[in-house]
Image: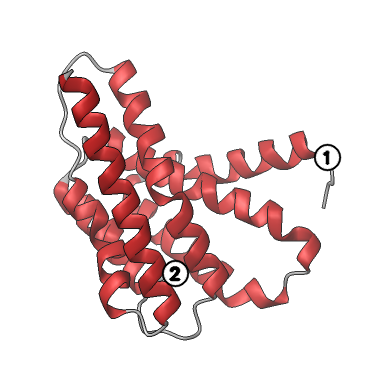
Amino acid sequence: MSDKPLIQQQLANDLAALILDVPEDNVLPFISIFWQVHCEEWHGLDRFRLDKYLLLFRRIVFYSFCWLAQNDWDQVKVEAYTRLLLEGPLHPTDRKKPDAIVYHILEIYFEELEKVVEIQQQQQQDDFTVPIDLLKQPIIVLSTDALNKTTRIKAKQILLEYDTKQNNDMEDDSD
């Protein structure tokens, strides 16, 4: 209920960081229930609180990727996480999922992934492989299967922007 930005930011960070503190077997259920509750309650929020929740969503996505990075991008965990997103907030055919949440996740998904990968690169000496194709899967599914045409277009746009950026980064690295 605080209107002070620093307090809001700290609370969003602390709540999302719980992903790294809960027992390993409870991480995915924790994330799943988080999205379930927020999708169900989204329309009851007043517009003055939306920014606070959007920041919390950003932090949840960030710490979800941190958890995957801590687990060395384990394929089983990545698949479970992307399935969780597709069965939860990014479900392509569930009209009860708020478009605002879907669009926000689309906007921040690759930004937060890049932050985590950058942090991991700075902290680790060893090479590691991020399963980008698996991580892109929820966005790809939305780009083809979403009932909402605007969602399909937005997902395609996000994928194109990400792929273009990755290609440009690869060209810069080779120069």
Residue 103 on image: x %, y %: 49, 64
Q: Residue at x 30, y 33 (%)?
A: 70
Q: Which residue is mark 1?
A: 4
Which disc is residue 59 wearing? none
Q: Residue at x 53, y 44 (%)?
A: 59
Q: Are marks 1 and 2 in contact (CB under 8 Å)?
A: no
Residue 22 on image: x %, y %: 44, 45
Q: Residue at x 15, y 21 (%)?
A: 174
Question: Could you classify mark 2 by the number of other residues whose Cα lies within 10 Å: few (under 14), some (14-19), or many (20 or more)?
Answer: many
Q: Is residue 145 left or right of residue 40?
A: left
Q: Is residue 21 left or right of residue 8?
A: left
Q: Residue at x 70, y 60 (%)?
A: 50
Q: Is residue 76 visible?
A: yes
Residue lying farthest to the top in this orientation: 125
Looking at the image, which is closer to me, 169 or 2?
Answer: 169
Q: How far apart, in angstroms, are the residues tagged by discs 1 and 2? A: 28 Å
State which quadrant residue 85 falls in. Answer: bottom left
Going by the numbered disc 1, the residue's amino acid type is Lys
Going by the numbered disc 2, the residue's amino acid type is Pro
- How many marks overall? 2
Q: Quadrant of the C terminus?
A: top left
Image vertical order of residue 127 relative to residue 32, above or below: above
First in sequence, mark 1 or 2: give its number. 1
Q: Which secondary structure, mark 2?
A: loop
Image color mode = secondary structure
Which disc is residue 89 wearing? 2
Residue 144 on image: x %, y %: 26, 75
Q: Is residue 157 left or right of residue 128?
A: right
Residue 71 on image: x %, y %: 25, 37
Looking at the image, which is closer to me, 30 or 56?
Answer: 56
Question: Could you classify mark 1 by the number of other residues whose Cα lies within 10 Å: few (under 14), some (14-19), or many (20 or more)?
Answer: few
